[in-house]
Image (cartoon, helix red, strand yellow):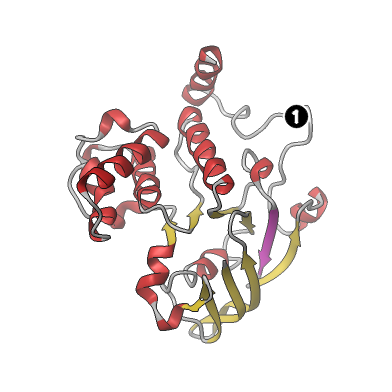
């Protein structure tokens, strides 16, 4: 479990997170939503010690993050919206293997994790590709695969579907659902609830650094008031259905193969 207690974080004179308390249970799927600048990314950076609070504390699996950052970073996998600075190897397979290798795992287990993670993001045939040659969407998928390969207790993804086409998005959602069902706590940071809301147990919405809503069934009108795009109502189009061009064609082909 991730437990946040009365956390406040300031950037100079600006309070980015203001006295927030929040828990993420094992096996739960939480959407952390809010308009740009609401404090959601700053908040999740405390989950594994990337930031230290000015006030309050965070515990992961019952242990204060401040006392053991290394353990927290192993327990909480994190994928951010722009992964360009997070790659440590020249090829896809080597980059995804980096984390498991540093856990001291056997070669066979590393290979299993890497291949499983690449398959989950539809990159199984791109293991030898060079990172510098990848598109933005492909880099996002490699970053997600790297986090999956660590098999953390909790997984936090910040706007993970930006740049992903429909087949890749569907594959990632399927893996997140599997992880949740297997007991992994999943947090998806977003400003748009379309396509992910059906997996969520809770929606937590931040505004001006504070939690303004924490609900298993949030009102669409309240979400809009807080600057969050609500999930589609029954019979209306989802985010993917609203797409055009390559993404729409990809979705049609994926549906035809089912």
Residue 120, relative to residue 41: is it above or below?
above
Q: Residue furthest top?
A: 256
Q: Residue at x 72, y 46 (%)?
A: 230
Residue 156 point in image, percent of width and height: 50, 57
In the image: residue 236, left or right of residue 117: right
Residue 140, relative to residue 64: is it above or below?
above
Residue tagged by mark 1?
236
In the image: residue 60, left or right of residue 203: left
Please provide the residue range marked out in magenta.
202-207
Residue 119 colored magenta?
no
Quarter of the rendering occupied by the C terminus: top right
Nearer to the camera, 130 or 95: 95
Residue 84 point in image, percent of width and height: 31, 52
Residue 111, relative to residue 156: is it above or below?
above
Q: Which residue is drawn at 53% across and 53% down?
A: 184
Q: Which residue is drawn at 30% across and 42% down?
A: 114
Residue 92 point in image, percent of width and height: 25, 41
Would you say residue 239 is visible in this rendering? Answer: yes
């Amino acid at each position: 479990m991730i437990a946040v207690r009365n956390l406040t974080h300031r950037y100079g004179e600006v309070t980015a997170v203001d006295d927030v308390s929040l828990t993420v249970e094992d096996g739960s799927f939480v959407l952390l939503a809010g308009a740009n600048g609401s404090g959601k990314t700053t908040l999740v950076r405390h989950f594994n010690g990337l930031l230290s609070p000015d006030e309050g504390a965070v515990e992961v699996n019952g242990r204060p993050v401040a006392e053991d950052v290394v353990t927290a970073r192993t327990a909480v996998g994190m994928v951010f919206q722009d992964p360009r600075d997070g790659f440590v190897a020249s090829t896809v397979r080597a980059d995804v293997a980096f984390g498991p290798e540093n856990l001291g795992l056997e070669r066979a287990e590393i290979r299993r994790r890497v291949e499983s993670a690449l398959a989950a993001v539809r990159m199984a045939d791109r293991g030898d590709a060079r990172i510098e040659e990848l598109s933005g969407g492909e880099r996002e998928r490699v970053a997600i695969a790297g986090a999956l390969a660590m098999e953390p207790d909790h997984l936090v993804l910040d706007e993970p579907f930006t740049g992903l086409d429909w087949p890749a998005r569907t594959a990632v959602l399927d893996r997140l659902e599997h992880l949740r069902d297997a007991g992994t706590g999943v947090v998806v940071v977003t400003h748009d609830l379309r396509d992910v809301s059906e997996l969520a147990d809770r929606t937590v919405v931040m505004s001006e650094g504070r939690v303004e809503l924490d609900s298993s069934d949030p009102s669409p009108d309240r979400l809009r008031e807080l600057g969050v795009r609500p999930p589609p109502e029954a019979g209306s189009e989802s985010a993917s259905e609203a797409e055009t061009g390559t993404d729409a064609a990809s979705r049609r082909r994926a549906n035809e193969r089912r």
